[in-house]
Image (tube, rainbow, N blue to C red):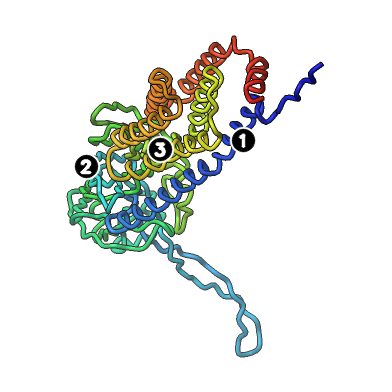
Amino acid sequence: MEATKPKKFTQSLTFKGFIIVALVLLLLIPQSMILNLIDERKDRSIETIEIINDKWSNPQTLCGPVLSIPYLKKKTETEVVETKDNKKETREKIIYESHTLHITPEQLNINTQLFPEEKHYGIYKTILYKSDININGSFKRFSEEDTASYNFQWDKAYLTLGLSDLKGVNNQVDFKLANQTLDVEAGGSYHSNEKQLIMAVPNLKELYEKNTLSFQCNINLKGSGSGSISFIPIGKNTQVEVEGAWKTPSFIGNFSPDSQIDDNFTAKWNILHFNRNIPEAWIDEYSYDSFHDSYFGVNLINAVDHYQQNTRSAKYAIMFIALTFVVFFFVEILTKKRIHPLQYLLVGIALILFYSLLLSISEQINFAIAYLIASVATIGLISAYAHSIFKSKMQTGILTTLLCGLYTFLYVILQQEDGALLIGSIGLFVILGVIMYVSRKINFYKQDDEIVQNNN
């Protein structure tokens, strides 16, 4: 009786399956390298954009105007002195302390027209803007009792208008208080990150007595930082309207506007005094950090930039590799053609190189065109190599169709913002269902036996 030769596990499909899984896991290393490369290029882009922004102007935050009036507070102090006959005597001494009363507007209206533009520096670009800002409103007038309770130094009164970056002021600021034009000078800071425009008001007392204390200001500002401009609702009632020619504005801060968005956008905010934690008046120094807890504004952004799209696409690399290897594996089962693990590895490397191609090309041209070029090149390379292995137009055509479907599916996901997870999950579920359906009648144990017999 002839002895049965032992089966060689290394020649079985089960062993080949383990090898394929190991190759997929091995290819996680170059995938992580691609992700690191994308992050590195993105960081380089951020550094370059910061250089562009610094030369143009930083993001702008507008706060004010605030009316400030110095005053003297009379204070009586007692002191004990020793007389010539060595007796102690209590005397009163009158001193005057200097303070400043800061007053916010009763009504503040800000109308802003943004003019976005893209600035290029080599292969990098950033979103900048110019703006035409009209500020108007009024301050509450003092009553006679209020005026009498303070020893105001009217000739030292001044107005302040806070800005993040005075470098962005693009013209001579026209500021009028009660129809009187004020001279505008650069001043100190509200706090460490915000500068001021200061306007002296030499005859404020006369203006208070004869006129409604209204103000009007026209200012042209430049800004950057993804086209960010924001406002602090310093007025008791603050109304802000921003318009611009941009399709994808992002509204930032603690208040949501009424907005309309198409090719242009319009956003309107109406903030009341009890909506924010800002006093109507305060004396001397005040922590302006709390003011920024109430900021709001708009960011001119690209909905999905090409670095974000590259990162998202690279995260699907393992899915592409696994599905492509599955096709090769099924061809190996159905045609009984042996495919060497090295050939699997070369195909996997070609799939990984797609993401390097996509990154490098998308830095030069539009992402959609870059994606088309990189995917066509990758599909063509793998299809030509597969044909040399399969020796069959039909099998090569099936693989090419699969790859075209996968890359089309990936592109659709990349273009989605809110529905990417849903579409991706449904797509993967369908793909898994197809694989299970195709493999349902394959007897892997029988295939193992046939392979061993053929090799023996």
**Residue type, numbered disc 2:** Phe
Q: Nearer the viewer, mark 3 or mark 1?
A: 1
Q: Relative to 299, is 21 on the left or the right?
A: right
- Distance in Å between CA atoms under marks 2 and 1: 54 Å
Split into 4 quadrants, where in the image is the C terminus?
top right
Q: Is residue 229 above or below residue 402?
A: below
**Residue type, numbered disc 3:** Phe
Which of the 4 quarters of the picture holds residue 79? bottom right
Q: Position of residue 437 (x, y in %)?
A: 55, 11
Q: Residue 115: which disc?
A: 2
Q: Is residue 270 visible?
A: no
Q: Relative to 4, is 129 on the left or the right?
A: left
Q: Nearer the viewer, residue 319 or 102?
A: 319
Q: Position of residue 407 (x, y in %)?
A: 39, 27
| Crowd tier of the residue under label 2, counting other residues whose Cα lies within 10 Å: few below 14, some 14–19, many 20 or above | some
Which of the 4 quarters of the picture holds residue 151? bottom left
Q: Nearer the viewer, mark 2 or mark 3?
A: 3
Split into 4 quadrants, where in the image is the N terminus?
top right
Q: Residue 22: which disc?
A: 1
- Residue at 53%, 17% (x, y): give it: 334
From the image, tell me which residue sits under label 3. Answer: 354
- Residue at 25%, 50% (x, y): give it: 120
- Distance in Å between CA atoms under marks 3 and 1: 21 Å
Q: Is residue 286 visible?
A: yes
Q: Earlier in the sequence, mark 2 or mark 1?
A: 1
